[in-house]
Amino acid sequence: MTDALVVSNVLLWVAVIALAAVVLALVRQIGVLHERVAPAGALMTGGGPRVGEPAPRFVGEDLFGRTVELGSADDSGASTLLLFVSPDCPVCKALLPVVRSIAVQEGPRLRVVLASDGPLEAQRRFAEEHGLRAFPYLVSAELGLAHQVAKLPHAVLIDALGIVRAKGLVNTREHLESLFEAQARGVASIQDYVAAGRERTLRGVG
């Protein structure tokens, strides 16, 4: 009877140890998967002003005759989301409801400015069809050249002092929100933040 009890206890401990090993392996695998599905941020491009540099100065009238100024200090303390779009860009059109949602969410802390280039009539039709009169809408080849915009939609987040805080190609809400996350964390991009975190982890392991 005693021998049977001892054997039973030994088997129980073996089972517990095996279960602990399985749990440990699962936890490690979850960590690996988490790294593989790291948050996707806006894809930064090499052209234009770098993050941390002043945004190019611009003053001009928008599509609706309103004076718009970029690249200077904003007395209201609001940041500016400068979004380059085009009437011929399907992704731009799909992103507009997201832009409206973010504008409402951020309130007076954010000013959204749309920018494009091309025939004015096409721009007006695009603005009217999508109800964009609420946002300043600049039609300027000069502005696109200053930021060296090559692909659309392209966004630049400028702080209240006129400094570029984040930028990149934005195809989804996650991409757009990554710009604000990067600004909050004081990094150039979410990719940089994730890479720095991995480096710290590796140093800790070493």
Image (cartoon, rainbow, N blue to C red):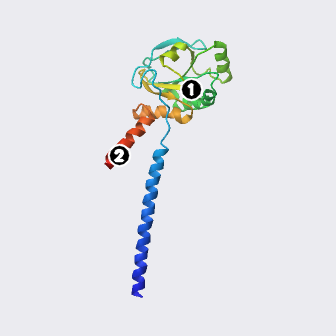
Q: Is residue 11 left or right of residue 175?
A: left
Residue indicated by mark 2: 202
Q: Nearer the viewer, residue 136 or 107?
A: 136
What is the number of the mark on residue 175? Answer: none
Q: Is residue 142 above or below residue 175?
A: above
Looking at marks 2 and 1 on the same chain, the residue that comes earlier in the sequence is marked by: 1
Residue 185 found in image quarter:
top left
Q: Residue furthest bottom?
A: 1
Q: Dot 1: what SS?
A: loop
Tell me where residue 201 appears, x and y as whole percent: 36, 46
Q: Which residue is mark 1?
A: 153
Residue 3, by quadrant, is: bottom left
Q: Residue at x 44, y 58 (%)?
A: 25
Horizontal and vertical percent position of residue 174: 53, 36
Q: Is disc 1 surrounded by few (<14), some (14 to 19) or many (20+) residues within 10 Å?
A: many
Name the residue type under label 2. Leu
